[in-house]
Image (tube, grey):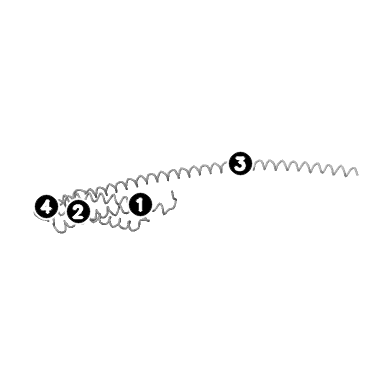
Amino acid sequence: MSDDPFFTVKEYNKISVISLLREIEQNFTTVTTLFESWNRIFSTVSSRNNEELRRTEEELKSTLQDITTDLDAIRVVENHPDKFSLTKREIESRREFVEQTRLRLQEIRRSLENNRHQELIDGHKSTKLFEQVRSKSRYEEVIEMDNTKFIENESLQQTILLREQDDQLESLYGTARNIHEIATTMGTELEDQNILLDEFGDQVDRTQGRLDKAMRKVAYIIKHNE
């Protein structure tokens, strides 16, 4: 595992992408629910000025804008995969998800802007479009399942990454403890050696003193025997 700070930044960016994808999924579910409510309310009121209808429509448009902003952010990620530590396969999978989501949003916007509510709620003439918005197509389910697997896999990878970091930290702490113990032992040995050197120095001094005294006696004897 790399200790390069840039590697850590890319991993953080990758986590941000995963969070963004999860947010898009949640908001898309909200949009689907709001659009169903909008159609239901519209079919029961006589004027578009109905307060509940306007409130639902405003909330729907706001959520649509939130998703669009998030999709634009994902497009930036697609253009700079290296900065987010994403593989080509991951980018292609995300691109399919983004395009499918954009198509759904365009259909809903057209319905709101063109007042095509009647096509969505009258009989079976336009059941296809309504069903596309209300329930996910098989293809979209596959994309979402793939996205969910991607998120789960990345979450697992992050867990493994954190465990490896913990193991590395524990190893570093162990090494630091060993170094500390070695340094302490060396310090103790040096102190013992200093004590021995001091004692040896004292012995040398005493021996030198005795030698000096003996030499003086020898010199005295020689002098008086001349």
**Left or right for 220, reference 193:** right
Residue sitting farthest toward the left: 46
Residue at figure coordinates x 35%, y 44% from the top left: 156
Counting other residues with Cα less than 10 Å from the Cα at mark 3, is it few (<14), some (14-19), or many (20 or more)?
Answer: few
Query: Could you tell me the amino acid type at mark 1?
Result: Lys
Counting other residues with Cα less than 10 Å from the Cα at mark 2, is it few (<14), some (14-19), or many (20 or more)?
Answer: many
The residue that mark 4 highlights is 125
The residue that mark 2 highlights is 60
Could you tell me if the residues under marks 2 and 4 are in contact, i.e. CB atoms within 8 Å? Answer: no
The residue that mark 1 highlights is 14
Disc number for residue 189: 3
Query: Could you tell me the amino acid type at mark 3?
Result: Glu
Q: Earlier in the sequence, mark 1 or mark 4?
A: 1
Q: Viewer-nearest of labels 3 and 1? A: 1
Coordinates of residue 14 in the picture (x, y in percent): 35, 52
Coordinates of residue 221 in the picture (x, y in percent): 87, 42
Query: In what quadrant of the picture does the C terminus appear?
Result: top right
Q: CA distance from mark 2 to mark 4?
A: 24 Å
Query: Could you tell me the amino acid type at mark 4?
Result: Lys
Disc number for residue 76: none
Q: CA distance from mark 1 to mark 4?
A: 44 Å
